[in-house]
Image: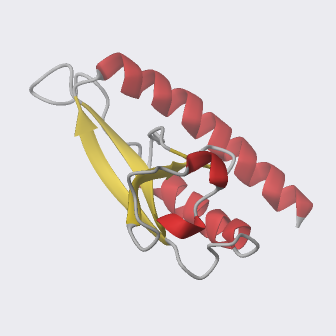
């Protein structure tokens, strides 16, 4: 697994690279606790991410490799089959850079470990 670049690997020492997964879903299909009165039903909600356990969230998911993100996307496809938006969502892996060094570095370590744990648990169930 090829890890993404850490702080100090760029000319700007505060820059950190991470992989994330963006989720796009029509507003009418998102969970009721995430409904935003400023959206119309047909609007596509952007700025959604999966949590490390596969729930939808507005919080950024920080992962330390594209391979881990790809494996998590496969898991999410199987998880989302039973949800109301099963046929109406899009998942997109993006590699981004940020100068929020502490947030991204801590997030990568925490989220990558949690996602790996989720994937291991899922493979033990199957």
Q: Residue 2: horizontal and vertical position, in percent?
A: 41, 49
Could you tell me which residue is drawn at 42 percent across and 57 percent down? 22
Q: Front-most of 26 and 104?
A: 26
| Residue at 50% in and 55% down | 69
* x then y, percent, for residue 85: 62, 73
Marker count (numbered):
0
Q: Name above or below for residue 124 compared with residue 29.
A: above
Q: Residue furthest right?
A: 125
Give the side of residue 35 with respect to residue 101, left or right.
Answer: right
Residue in front for this viewpoint, 103 or 34: 34
**Location of residue 9 by image quarter:** top left
Q: Is residue 1 visible?
A: no
User: In the image, what residue occupies the spot 41% across and 65% down?
Assistant: 40
Can residue 3 be seen at all in this image of the molecule?
yes
Asked if residue 21 lies left or right of residue 10, the reply is right
Q: 104 or 51: which is nearer to us? A: 51
Question: Quadrant of the image for the C terminus?
Answer: bottom right
Location of residue 14 (image quadrant): top left
Spot occupied by residue 115 in the image (x, y as percentages of width and height): 64, 45
**Quick one: which residue is furthest to the left in this view?**
11
Residue at x 54%, y 52% (from the top left corner): 35
């Amino acid at each position: 697994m090829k890890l993404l670049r850490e702080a100090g690997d760029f000319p700007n020492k505060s820059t950190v690279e991470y992989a994330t997964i963006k989720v796009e879903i029509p507003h009418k299909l998102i969970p009721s606790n995430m409904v935003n009165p400023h959206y119309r039903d047909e609007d596509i909600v952007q700025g959604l991410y999966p949590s490390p356990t596969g729930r939808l969230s507005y919080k950024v998911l920080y992962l330390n490799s594209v391979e881990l993100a790809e494996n998590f996307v496969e898991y999410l496809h199987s998880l989302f089959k039973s949800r109301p938006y099963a046929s109406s969502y899009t998942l997109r892996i993006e590699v981004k850079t940020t100068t929020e060094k502490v947030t991204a570095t801590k997030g990568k370590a925490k989220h990558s470990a949690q996602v790996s744990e989720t994937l291991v648990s899922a493979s033990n169930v199957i």
